[in-house]
Amino acid sequence: MSAGRAVWVLGEQRNGSIHPVSYELLAWGRTLADDLGVGLECILVGHGVAEEANQLIMRGADRVYCLDHRGLETFRVDPYARLIEMLVREHEPDILLAAATTMGRTLMPVLAAKLHTGLTADCTGLSIALEERLLLQTRPAIGGNVLATIKTPSHRPQMATVHPKSRRPLPADPSRSGDIEVVEIDQALLASRVSRLHFEPDLTMGSSIQDAELIVAGGRGLRTAKRFADLFEIAKLLRGVVGASRCAVDQGWASYAHQVGLSGKSVSPTTYIALGISGSPNHLAGMSSAELVIAVNSDPDAPIFQVADVGIVADLAEFLPAWLDRLRKQAGENEGAR
Ligand SMILES: Cc1cc2nc3c(=O)[nH]c(=O)nc-3n(C[C@H](O)[C@H](O)[C@H](O)COP(=O)(O)OP(=O)(O)OC[C@H]3O[C@@H](n4cnc5c(N)ncnc54)[C@H](O)[C@@H]3O)c2cc1C
């Protein structure tokens, strides 16, 4: 395949409405396409999705391919992979990105095998090596101790899944224009060995930390269950929620629903307060798109300070009770003033 082809992203929908992760992918794709000087195109598969396609143009796509059919209403890997493979072979994009969601993680390996190309899973960063015009795909590796940057020099498309919430979407721009192409679908391509019987949401996995604007997160540096428990009061006083590193979850101080990171949740709050968290790549993978990061750690060389906007070097054994006291007093004064 020749260089100079478009960057493609795989949009996602739920019940006919575009899932916000599609806009995050478009933000990544827009930067890559602009660096390469090529178009950004989006594939949207589902039923009743064609009317929604303009949302993708407003968020950065130059063209949307809509695969709209009742038989595509819910995700089934065999017809989705067959149809996307057909489109990729026809248009030969240079890059194909999907979100590292259940759909992306299921579909992309199948597509990569069909297309005989490579796939880098769960990327937390993407950029272009301008001289070679190659996609640089960055992800944590070797137990999260290093960040590996991977290239796909000799096969096309260059394929990657991207960790959700690793990038903020671009604001919707109603003045943007682009093409929407509704792709004609051959019924024979819809055959599947899988049929959906019913859908049951996992109610044990609350989405509260993913929706929160302020997260007070604790790690092993809190040292005791009692000190971690104080975070719940602090979070309540600040009208936020509690997040945790995997070490804190492994200690039993918080449930898995609170875990932030590569194998936990990805969050994108306005403010992320990291207390006694070292800042391993596996943790940063889940919170790197937070707007403001405040970190408290006793080690001035802790890696979390490299991503923190405000860094406080302090011993949490002293810092935490003092801070909690102050928050309680402020809350009392506010209550008294009413
Ligand atoms: C496949 C894989 C997936 C993973 N997924 C995740 C994930 O989703 N989320 C995640 O968080 N991790 C994940 N990890 C684990 C990750 O690599 C780190 O081990 C983990 O994030 C470290 O947690 P921590 O920062 O709480 O602990 P540590 O790395 O032990 O850091 C503790 C910090 O506390 C500081 N400290 C100690 N005492 C004090 C004190 N008194 N006052 C102030 N600061 C103090 C220390 O200086 C240190 O920086 C994963 C690992 C693997 C292999």
Image (spheres, rainbow, N blue to C red):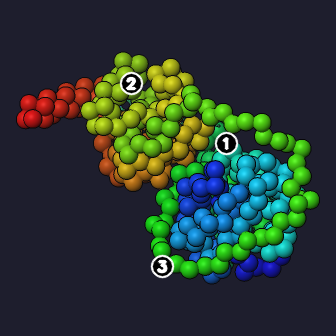
Image coords of residue 184 (percent x, y): 81, 70
Residue type indicated by callout 3:
Ser
Nearest the viewer among 199 and 35 is 199
The label shown at residue 228 is: 2
Residue assigned mark 3? 175
The mark closer to the camera, 3 or 1, is: 3
Q: Quadrant of the N terminus?
A: bottom right
The mark closer to the camera, 3 or 2, is: 3
In the picture provided, is 9 more to the left or to the right than 106?
Answer: left
Separation (CA) of disc 3 from disc 1: 45 Å
Separation (CA) of disc 1 from disc 2: 29 Å
Question: Residue at horizontal 63%, vertical 81%?
Answer: 37
Image coords of residue 25 (percent x, y): 60, 61
Separation (CA) of disc 3 from disc 2: 48 Å
What is the number of callouts on the image? 3
Please report contact status of discs 1 and 2: CB closer than 8 Å, yes or no.
no
Helix, strand or loop at mark 3? loop
Residue type indicated by callout 2:
Phe
Residue assigned mark 1? 142
Nearest the viewer among 206 and 267 is 206
Image coords of residue 209 (percent x, y): 46, 38
The label shown at residue 170 is: none
Helix, strand or loop at mark 1? loop
- First in residue order: circle 3 vs circle 2: 3
Question: Residue at horizontal 65%, vertical 47%?
Answer: 101
- First in residue order: circle 1 vs circle 2: 1
In the picture provided, is 130 more to the left or to the right than 219?
Answer: right
**Residue 27 visible to the viewer:** yes
Question: Residue at horizontal 9%, vertical 35%?
Answer: 338
**Residue 92 visible to the viewer:** no
Residue type indicated by callout 1:
Ile
